[in-house]
Image (tube, rainbow, N blue to C red):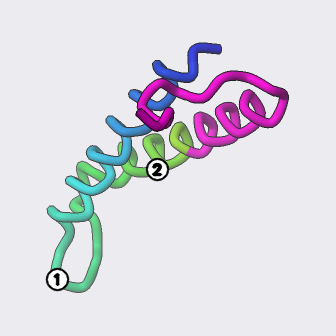
Amino acid sequence: MDPNANLAEQRHLIRSINAMNDRSTDDGQLQAQDRTQYEADCNRLAELAQALDGWITRGGCLPIAWIAK
């Protein structure tokens, strides 16, 4: 697994999810065209987070962005 690619995709999905939330109605309802994509993005984000956690737990390296300089 490439932890850098994983983190990059997670960050992309977070921006996408936040954008859909910003477009939601005043009562928090997603726009109709966003509902399916929102669910898909949330599911993919969970998969990526779980994979990265497993990678790091098994001794894999951290994403470069997480390494202190």
Q: Magenta span has 6?
A: no
Disc 1 is placed on an element classified as loop
- Specify the farthest residue to the bottom: 27
User: Where does the magenta region start and end?
Assistant: 46-69
Earlier sequence position, callout 1 versus callout 2: 1
Q: How far is the residue under mark 1 from the one under mark 2?
A: 20 Å
Where is residue 68? Give x, y as percent.
Answer: 46, 37
Amino acid type for the residue under numbered disc 1 = Asp
Q: Would you place residue 24 above or below residue 12 in this image?
A: below
Relative to the observer, which residue lies in front, 50 or 22?
A: 50
Q: Nearer the viewer, residue 5 or 40?
A: 5
Instruction: Give coordinates of residue 14: x percent, y percent.
Output: 36, 47
Instruction: Name the residue at 28% across, 44% down.
Output: 16
Q: Quadrant of residue 25?
A: bottom left
Q: Residue furthest front?
A: 69
Residue identifier under label 2: 39
Residue at the (47%, 41%) spot, across then down: 40
Q: Is residue 56 magenta?
A: yes
The location of residue 34, given as percent across then percent down, is 27, 51
Residue drawn at point x = 24 percent, y = 85 percent: 27
